Image: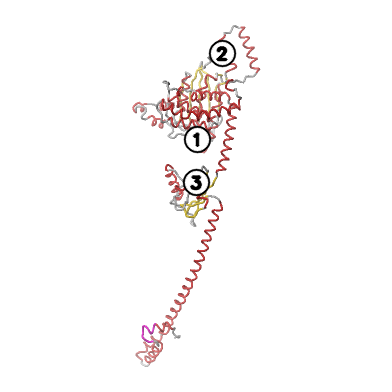
Amino acid sequence: MQALSSKLKQQFENILKEPDAKGKLELLCQELRKHEQFQEYAEFLKEFPKFFDAIEESYLHYESKAKFNTHNLVLGGEELDQANNELESLNVTIKAMLDGFGQGLLFFNKDGICSPVYSKASTILLETDPAGKHIADVLKVSDGERKSVLDWINMVFAGNVALTFEDLAEIAPASYPHSEGLYIKLEYKPLFDTNGKLKNVLVIAIDATKEQQAKSRMAENESRALRTLRIARNRNYFLRFISQFRNIFMESDLIDDDCIDFDLEQFKRDVHTMKGLSGTFHLDNLTKILHDIETELNYINTHKEAQDLLLNYYYKLNENFNSSLQLAKEVLGSDFESAGNTVNIQTKKILGFAQDIKKKLESGITPDEISLILLQELIAVPIRELFANFDMQLQELADRSGKMVNNSLFLGENFVVLPEKYENFTTSLVHVARNIIDHAIDEPDVRKQFGKLPKGYITIHNEKVGDKFNITITDDGNGIDTDVIRNKLAGKIDSAILATMSDEEIIQHIFDDNLSSKDEVSELSGRGVGMSAVKAEVEKLGGNIMVKSTLGKGTSLHIILPFIWN
């Protein structure tokens, strides 16, 4: 047995009360060997030195391990201090980097709570210290939009939707409402942990005020160019517009306190029509004012309320109207109003007409017949020309809505009509164009899903029938859902009568005042005014209008009008 360590000797002394345990054990073994009957025990005790050696090795092992751990503990404390210093340095570096970008950079977690790490620019651009606050509060989300933002955060962090983060970011708040009028654009980036799970969302706030101002100037210049071009190419159409506008708003009987024949529904139709036409000529400010008037008209029931509303907007309307009129004078000449409608006639046609009249006079033609020939030969225009602005409106509205339509396909006859007699009717067609784009034609991708070509098709078929003519406007859009119309009519028509009405009868109610198949109002339609305005103008001319539709395939508008020459 090897020499015992001091610790082991101390254990023997404490427990056995004998410091020389080794010596005592050896003497005991010698005495036992002297007696044969105790040889077995002597052999057993002979192995005890090995047992003590094993205990000694254990002592030494754990002593070494304890020293090692103590050393590591000291070393670990030093390394921890060093790591803390490096982390603090890293935080300072990261903050310096964040501040160096000049952008508002902050992070929020699955609960929407913002991290204490953010850039200095965040407090300037977002006007608050975001640390510990909910992102909806930081971005000044309105009460009405708060639930949508909370739902968006849940969807983003849930990770169980088919949409990508980039797709979901499209529905997040796009800008921050800065109190000083700056345009603060917001962008979002995902931050994942080592397991690929979304841990935080990075919000980037960018002062894009100058960029937005530049875009606004470009948009205004583009709009002005389009206004100029549209007015120049559609002189007579614009002339009708300003004449109708003056009659409805500037010289309206509505302003007169003694007015007793005020028709509120007609006024709503007129406002809706003027809004559509001002949009056609890219009179954006005027269009917005008329849109606001339309919205307030929904809460008006009396002549006095309508009068107050018009007077409240009178100066705004007058200012914007005069601005548009000034632009028209620059384009068409200062006397374009006094000149009235113009018709371009080839000299050859006038000479031919003079010779033809001379021959007819010699044959005894009457003055009334001469007048009719004059109108038909020199003043009247082909029926298709009446739809030039309608087709233009279709293209423009489709472009604004992210949809596509082919140029209208004209079918049937191209007989002549006197355009002045049908001015209000052709003006009202703006509502047909808006309904086709807003209700009927879908985006190209949606049309493909239903086996249709990306571009919508609109046909206009004209047919002369005696002293009348038929116009059929057809689209290949969604068609009209008669069940939706039935539901809209519930409460307006007796339920027993409603139950007996056929789908063909139900669908004619799209011409009713204040009835729309849409639940939401858009810039284009949804107020239930447009088609009633078209019907009103058709009936003023002594005509008829009806609609046919097949759900999923399209709609046809059938119009019958008389020829008017006097």
Identify whether 35 is placed above or below 72.
below
Region rendered in magenta: 11-18
Q: Which residue is mark 3?
A: 169
Q: Are marks 3 and 1 in contact (CB under 8 Å)?
A: no
User: What x and y, as percent, mark residue 253?
Assistant: 46, 22
Q: Residue furthest left?
A: 496
Residue type indicated by callout 3:
Ala
Q: CA distance from mark 2 to mark 1?
A: 45 Å
- Taking the magenta stretch, the answer to whether it contains residue 13 is yes
Secondary structure mostly seen in the magenta stretch: helix
Q: Which residue is mark 1?
A: 442
Q: Residue at image x 52%, y 19%?
A: 421
Mark 1, residues whose alpha carbon is within 10 Å: few (<14), some, or many (≥20)?
Answer: many
Residue type indicated by callout 2:
Leu
Q: Which residue is mark 2?
A: 372
Q: CA distance from mark 3 to mark 1?
A: 24 Å
